[in-house]
Every structure is written in C-alpha cells, then in structure tokens.
C-alpha cells in the first residue's frame, strides 16, 4: 500500500486522538488535527453568551495563544490582498463589522462581508452547533470593535480611529503601553481574534470542543464540489489541488504534493493541466497530511531537515531501527538495568555476551507477542527531505509485516554486535552493553563528531536498508570507520575507544566473531591484532600509573595496519626497556608474544596491509588481558582498571 | 498462448513514477511496475501500429528496494532546480506478454500476418530489443533476455500471504486502442502472490478516468513498412 494510503489508515485508526493536546519533551504542544482545521496564534479572546450577547474580552497570555481553528481550502492558502476568510476565528479586519467605521483600510471589497456571509451559511446549515449560532448572532450586530474598545482590549486615537503603532503621544490618552501592542507583531488590525461561548454547564473552549470540530467538518464536506477519481483510494470523491505544508515544523514551507507549474514541463507534455496528471481527494489529503504532521511531532527524528519516521498502522510505537541496543533494551524493558560490572571469568565471557544478545531478542519477541491478537499488522518506515525550500520528497518508503520487521531487528542487533562502553546510565555512570550501535554513532565512528550534518543524514539513510532489509553495510562506511579506528594518535582517548568498539561491530556484521578471545583463530590479521594488543598492555603495565602518555603500540598503530612486519620490529625494539622494567613478570607476556607470533605462517609474515579483523583481534586480546584471569604462574597481579579514562 | 513471448528484464535502477509526487517535480517510484511500463518495454522490443501489446503477468524476482538520488534537473526557462528522485534498486522482472491485432486500424488490415509478426518479435527479443529498453524512465537503462517464465528462483517464492500495493495507475488508454477519441487513465489495485502479479486486461479495468480529447495518429502504407517487407529482409539475413 502506498505511503499516503497508510497515513490515511493511520489517521482513521487514531480518530479518538483528534484534537487532544499532547506535549513534546521541550513543552511544545501538538495534536492530531481534525480535517479542515489548522493552528494559529490568537491574540484576543472574546467571550459571548449563549443568547449571542457580548460578555467580555481579554488579551491572551503569551503561553496560551496557540489555537485550533477551522479553515477552508481558500483560507489555508490565502496571501497578499486576496480575501479568503477563515470560517470562525480570524483577524480583526475580517471579523469586525465596524472595522471601516473605525478607520480600517480595505483594498477592494469589505472582508467582513465575505466573512459574515460564510459564517451565515454555516450557522444556517443543518450541521450548525448552538455555539456557532450564538457567535453568528453577536457578530452580525457589527459592533465588535466598539465592545473591544469599551473593554480596553484595543485602542483608538483622539479621532476615534484605530491606533496602528504605539507612540508616546498616546500615553496621555491611555496611560502605559497596552499589552495588545506587545503581543501583535504588526498593527492592531492584524490581531487574531478567537471566540468562546459561555454556557452554564459546558466549560469547554470553542477551539477545544469536538462538537465544534465535527460541526464544521460535516458542514464543509457538504460544500465540497467537483468529484474525481482519487489516486490513493481509487474512489470517486471530492478532489482538491491544494495540499498542506508545515509538515516538518510550523515554519516549514515545503509541500509533498504541489502543482503550480504553468511554464515548465514538470508534468506538462503528456498532460496539459495538473488535474490531468493526478487527482487526490480532499479527505485523503487532509487526513494523510495531518497524520504525518502528528507522527513527526510525536516520534519523528529530524537531522538537518531530513525526517526519519517509523510507525505502525495499529500500534504507533515501534522499535526504532536507528537506536542502539542499549536504548532499545531500555525502551522495551524500562525496569531492568543493563549489566554494569565487567565480567571476570573466562568461562562466563561468551556465555554472558550471548545471553545479553538473547535477552534483547527475547525482549523483541515479547514485544511481538503483545500483538498476537492481531493476525496482520504492518510497520511503515519513511524518510523525507527537501532539495529546495518549496518541495518535500519521499526518499525512502518501506511497508513490511511486523513479524518480518522484528526478525530483521533481532538479526541486526545480533550480528552488528560488539561490547561498548560509551553510554551512561541514568546515574551518570558508565554503562557496558553488548549489541549494535545506533546509526548516529556509526556516523560518529565513520566521520567523527564534527562531521557535516549532510554527510551524517546521508549515511543514516544508506544504513537504514541494511538494518531493515538485511543488506551489507556499504564498504566505504566500514573502511572509513576502520581507518579512523587505526589512527588513535589523531583522536582523544575516549573518542578512539568509542570509534574502536563501533568499528568492531561494523566489521563483525560479516565476520561473526565473539568479543571473547578466539585462541584457535589463525587468521593473519587477527593474529597481528593480538600481537599489537599484547605490546600495548605490556607497556601500559610497565609504565607508572601517573604517566599518561600513549604506548608505542598505540602510536604505531596506524603504520602497523599498513606495514605490519616492518612496524612490528620497531615496536619490538621499543618494548625492550619496558620488558626490563617488569622483571620476572615479563615472562607471561613474552610467552604470549611467542605463542601468537608462532601462529603466523612465515609466508604471511610480510608487509601486506591488514584487514579489519586485526581490530577484532586487538580488542579481544586487550579485553582478555585486562579483564580475564591472569595465567602467570610466577605472580598474581591484581586486575587493573581500564587503561583509558572515558569522558 | 498464441503470439506470446516470455522474457526477463533487469537493470540497475527503475523509476515507475507515482503521479502524485510527479506533480511538483520530486519523483517517487511505485514499488512494482505498471502495466503501461511493461507494455512500453515490449513495444521497445518490437511494435507496429498493427499490433496491440497485452501484458499478461509479471514476476518480481529481486527484493523491492529503494534508493534516492539528488538530481539537478534543467529548467526550460534557463538555470536549474534541485530535486530528490527515489528509484527502485536492481530491479529484475520476468514478464509474459502477447500481442493482438488492432481492429481499430482497418487501413492496416493487409499487415495482419500473425506468424510473421510473431517470428520477428521473437527474433527481436533474442537480439535484446530493436530499441532501447528502459524501466519507467529514460535514464533507467535495462536489458531483456528470453527466459522460461517462472522457472528461475525468485526472492518472494516462499513469501507467505499476499502483498497489496493499494491503488495504482494501470495504464493509459489511447484513441486508436479504444476507439474513443479521448485519452484516459486506468487505475487498479495490484496484488502480489509469491512474487507474481496477474494484470487485468485494459478493457477489464473498471476505474477509468477521462483526461482529454485526443485524435488517433495516422498510420498508413506511407509511413509503415509492411510485415511482408520486413520479414523478407530478415530472411535474407539482414539485421533486426
């Protein structure tokens, strides 16, 4: 099914959420908009009685100006001198019948005439609610400005004309600067007015009243004309050629569907008019776009104007494919804390890591089982971006069965897996987890923390199919991460450690290694990596604890990855003074070097560049030496803490 | 089936543009080919105004994958604009199609020789098509080869259940094929089972949307080589 159809179905499945205000983490409000509605900042609230009499008026507080208002196709795209009134709440120049009498300037016809005519149609239609009739009764008396002035909401000059801009000379008339001039960006006539009807037993605001929403939706549906085939549903319904913008945020001007080309050949050639090329019904366009806006506010991730969105048709909350295993585990089982202690036993190492991966798979399976009552449910993955300010493109769309999606996630978090220590838990302590990094962290490893956001978002888009469809990770990403991980001198130590573990995870997607040291592995690169790790740990042990310089193994890591045999002789020479310093304790390390080096075949001990496996060997050997049991028979050194502090 | 061919068509990219996103200039591909796109592929292999190509069935061989590209389209008034096009990646389809004679062209009744047309069609298919093969858009070059429909293993062979693609464009009705002097668009709802999509016949499509008036293009013996002539050329060892 197409993305528009799925958005349409999502809207219909969540109709009970229409109009309910929800809050983002930054205290911004958002809602699932009803059809034919939009949001607007309102500056003035006018209270009206049930009988259609003026009751009171106030200037709104800044925190309470966002208002859900009905709109027509014309009013949602009005601009310049065009007169297209909103159906109910609108600017002062539209809603005030005595606007001209108080010095208001109009260009051609009177905006109020169009407004009140439209409101009259609604008030007299069979769908009108009592509140609409009350508001219409009052406004048709044409005395709104008069009442607002009496309530000191808006202000007149000495000639009984609306004051455009506040000036010192008006202080003699009205005292301090009134709040309306602070709240409205332009002139007083641009003040947006909203109306509320006071009832004895009903305190719902007009702009939060679902009865009002339904009243206008039904009224406006009866006015829609010109039926045509809808390319989304295939039915003959009233069509539209104006579609929503403000999709990514309130200031967004890009449109997913736009058709205003009269000079180019975007669609002209085979077709003469935009309606020839395609037609979409008003209802589908409204519901699909409103659902998309709501989902982006609710759970979309935006990086440099690119939107990554994942949702399900039935259950909106879907595990995020871009998240790492740590975040995923917290989401699926928030009461459990990941393992914080380093493992101490050789036997337990692989068991613990496999157990951890199995726990994530179990959590995902548990998540899947919670939906067992539904036979079929789907997951949607959508990526949006714009190349120009006026148009929004769908870069990627995928609709797949939820079971398949969960299987792919389990596979990803089991294969692109390694031990990571760069996450912090809620107490700010270092958290260790075994699993997949997030795509953002993959970008960190491949391009560094200061990479341009365009590069990051492009990479995230390219990695997403690897997670969802099981493709290979692009070679350039793996190579870039590998090269950065092989150059620790250029990075801070925390940065390098993070890059190293993420790179090991990326390499592991095609190698299926364990973090536990594989002493049976006789791969050339793996063995060279182990050699480098032994040299690193040996030297680190020999250095005083207050000496913070990096070891020679780390310094030569870059050239070691390209010319291993030549560089190894250099590293071996640099080890001599440190071996002397260790005394008898050096025997364990010397034996280990002999053991690993002897595994390398003579014909392979050359200067051919190492593959990524050497990082796996390096990491595993170092981890073994730092956390595994020391096997030296001569002494029992205490298990050291990590050699590198993490930020 | 009479007058039928079976072939596979594959390339690096495909773009069966969804008309809803085409309006503004940001192209997004459908997930599967339209009937009209595959008909265009067969017509690139071999076609004459005497014939109407009917696409019977398509089989999706590779997984449906999308990839987007930043494009710099030229504007006819000068300068360029920027857009994102989203393509299908590594498309591979097996197609079964056949031809029937166009009864709306009585001028070309002399050209209706089933046997010769079919032989030329098969021979053109062996050669990879008489014209450039492309999948939906001109920049998406593709290749055709004969095959036995349904024989090779496909990605969706073991997929459980059906995949519904929602409402899609089926194709365009032209005046010389319908007998009505207007251009129409057909819509339908494809369903894929184990990778197979069976196409409705154009006349069986119930959702037909009239676009505009249109007159059939004139073809007669002045601008059409007869099938007998072409067949003799081929028999004499000429190129397809």
Image: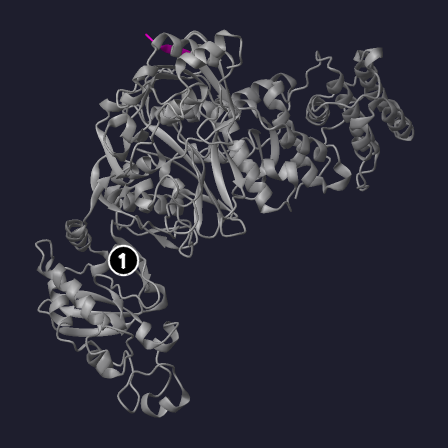
Which secondary structure, mark 1?
Answer: helix
The chain identifier of the residue carrying mark 1 reads A
Q: Is residue A134 left or right of residue A307?
A: left
Q: Is residue A525 left or right of residue A233?
A: right
Q: Position of residue A158 (x, y in %)?
A: 29, 91
Position of residue A268 relative to residue A21, above or below, is above
Q: Position of residue A582 (x, y in %)?
A: 87, 28
Look at the image and give the residue range highlighted in magenta. Answer: B2-7
Q: Is residue B150 left or right of residue B191?
A: right
- Identified at 26% across, 23% down, the residue is B104
Q: Quadrant of the C terminus of chain A?
A: top right
Res. A615 visible in picture: yes
Closest to the observer, A281 or B109: B109
Closest to the observer, A546 or B105: B105
Q: Quadrant of residue B227?
A: top left
Res. B146 visible in picture: no
Closest to the observer, A336 or A300: A300
Majority secondary structure in the magenta region: strand
Q: Position of residue A562 (x, y in %)?
A: 80, 27
Q: Is residue A618 left or right of residue B31?
A: right
CA neighbours of label 1 inside 10 A, class few (<14), some (14 to 19), many (20+):
some
Residue placed under numbered mark 1 in the picture: A74
Q: How is the image coloured?
A: one colour
Q: Quadrant of residue A1?
A: top left
- Identified at 29% across, 28% down, the residue is B176
Closest to the observer, A132 or A126: A126
Residue A369: say if magenta: no
């Amino acid at each position: 099914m197409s993305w528009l159809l799925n958005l349409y179905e999502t809207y219909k499945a969540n109709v009970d959420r229409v109009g309910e205000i929800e809050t983002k983490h930054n205290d911004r409000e958002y809602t699932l908009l009803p059809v034919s509605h939009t949001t607007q900042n309102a500056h003035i609230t006018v209270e009206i009685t049930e009988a259609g009499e003026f009751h009171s008026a106030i200037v709104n507080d800044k925190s309470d100006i966002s208002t859900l208002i009905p709109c027509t196709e014309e009013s949602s795209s009005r601009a310049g001198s065009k007169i297209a009134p909103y159906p109910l709440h609108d600017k002062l120049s539209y809603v005030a019948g005595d606007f001209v009498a108080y010095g208001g300037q109009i260009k051609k016809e009177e905006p109020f005439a169009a407004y009140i005519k439209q409101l009259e149609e609604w008030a007299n239609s069979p769908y009108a609610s009592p509140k609409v009739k009350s508001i219409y009764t009052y406004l048709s008396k044409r005395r709104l400005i008069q009442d607002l002035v009496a309530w000191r909401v808006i202000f007149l000059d000495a000639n009984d004309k609306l004051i455009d801009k506040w000036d010192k000379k008006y202080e003699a008339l009205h005292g301090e600067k009134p709040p309306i001039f602070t709240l409205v960006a332009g002139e007083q006539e641009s003040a947006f007015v909203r109306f509320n009807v006071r009832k004895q037993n009903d305190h719902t605001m007009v702009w939060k009243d679902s009865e009002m929403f339904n009243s206008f939706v039904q009224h406006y549906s009866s006015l829609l004309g010109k039926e045509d085939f809808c390319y989304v549903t295939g039915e003959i319904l009233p069509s539209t050629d104006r579609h929503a913008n403000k999709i990514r945020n309130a200031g967004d001007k890009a449109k997913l569907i736009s058709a205003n080309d009269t000079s180019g050949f975007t669609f002209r050639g085979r077709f003469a008019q935009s309606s020839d090329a395609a037609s979409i019904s008003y209802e589908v366009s409204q519901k699909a776009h409103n659902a998309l806006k709501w989902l982006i506010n609710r759970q979309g991730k935006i990086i440099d104007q690119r939107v990554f969105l994942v949702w399900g048709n039935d259950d909106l909350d879907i595990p995020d494919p871009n998240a790492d295993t740590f975040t995923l585990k917290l989401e699926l089982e928030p009461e459990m804390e990941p393992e914080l202690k380093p493992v101490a036993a050789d036997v337990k190492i692989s068991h613990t890591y496999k157990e951890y991966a199995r726990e994530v798979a179990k959590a995902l399976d548990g998540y899947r089982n919670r939906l067992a009552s539904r036979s079929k449910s789907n997951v949607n993955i959508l990526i949006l971006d714009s190349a120009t300010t006026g148009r929004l493109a769908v870069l990627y769309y995928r609709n797949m069965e939820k079971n398949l999606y969960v299987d792919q996630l389990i596979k990803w978090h089991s294969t692109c897996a390694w031990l990571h220590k760069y996450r912090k838990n809620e107490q700010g302590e270092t958290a260790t987890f075994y699993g997949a990094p997030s795509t953002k962290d993959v970008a960190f490893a491949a391009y560094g923390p200061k990479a341009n956001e365009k590069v990051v978002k492009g990479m995230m888009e390219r990695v997403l199919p690897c997670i969802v469809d099981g493709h290979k990770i692009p070679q350039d990403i793996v190579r870039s991460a590998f090269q950065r991980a092989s150059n620790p001198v250029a990075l801070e130590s925390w940065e390098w450690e993070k890059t190293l573990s993420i790179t090991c995870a990326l390499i592991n997607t095609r190698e299926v290694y364990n973090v536990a040291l594989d002493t049976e592995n006789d791969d050339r690169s793996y063995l060279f990596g182990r050699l480098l790790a032994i040299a690193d740990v040996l030297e680190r042990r020999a250095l005083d604890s207050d000496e913070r310089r990096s070891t020679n193994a780390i310094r030569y890591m870059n050239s070691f990855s390209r010319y291993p045999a030549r560089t190894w002789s250099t590293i071996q020479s640099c080890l001599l003074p440190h071996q002397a310093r260790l005394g008898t304790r050096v025997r364990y390390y010397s034996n280990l070097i002999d053991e690993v080096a002897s595994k390398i075949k003579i014909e392979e001990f050359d200067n051919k560049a190492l593959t990524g496996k050497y990082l796996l060997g390096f990491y595993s050997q170092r981890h073994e030496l730092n956390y595994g049991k020391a096997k030296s028979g001569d002494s029992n050194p205490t298990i050291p803490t990590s050699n590198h502090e993490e930020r | 089936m009479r007058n039928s061919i079976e072939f596979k068509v594959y390339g690096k990219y495909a773009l069966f543009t969804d008309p809803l996103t085409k309006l503004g200039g940001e192209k997004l591909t459908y997930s599967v080919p339209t009937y009209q796109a595959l008909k265009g592929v067969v017509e690139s292999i071999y076609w004459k105004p005497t014939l109407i190509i009917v696409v019977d069935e398509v089989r999706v061989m590779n997984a449906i994958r999308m990839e987007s590209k930043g494009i710099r389209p030229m504007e006819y008034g000068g300068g360029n604009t920027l857009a994102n096009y989203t393509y299908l990646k590594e498309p591979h389809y097996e197609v079964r199609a056949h031809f029937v004679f166009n009864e709306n062209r009585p001028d070309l009744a002399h050209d209706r020789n089933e046997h010769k047309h079919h032989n030329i069609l098969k021979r053109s298919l062996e050669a990879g098509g008489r014209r450039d093969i492309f999948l939906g858009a001109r920049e998406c070059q593709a290749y055709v080869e004969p095959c036995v429909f349904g024989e090779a293993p496909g990605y969706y062979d073991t997929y459980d259940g059906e995949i519904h693609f929602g409402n899609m464009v089926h194709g365009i009705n032209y005046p010389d094929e319908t007998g009505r002097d207007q251009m129409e668009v057909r819509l339908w709802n494809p369903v894929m089972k184990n990778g197979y999509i069976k196409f409705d016949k154009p006349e069986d499509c119930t959702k037909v949307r009239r676009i505009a008036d249109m007159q059939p293009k004139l073809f007669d013996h002045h601008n059409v080589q007869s099938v007998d002539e072409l067949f003799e050329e081929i028999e004499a060892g000429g190129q397809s």
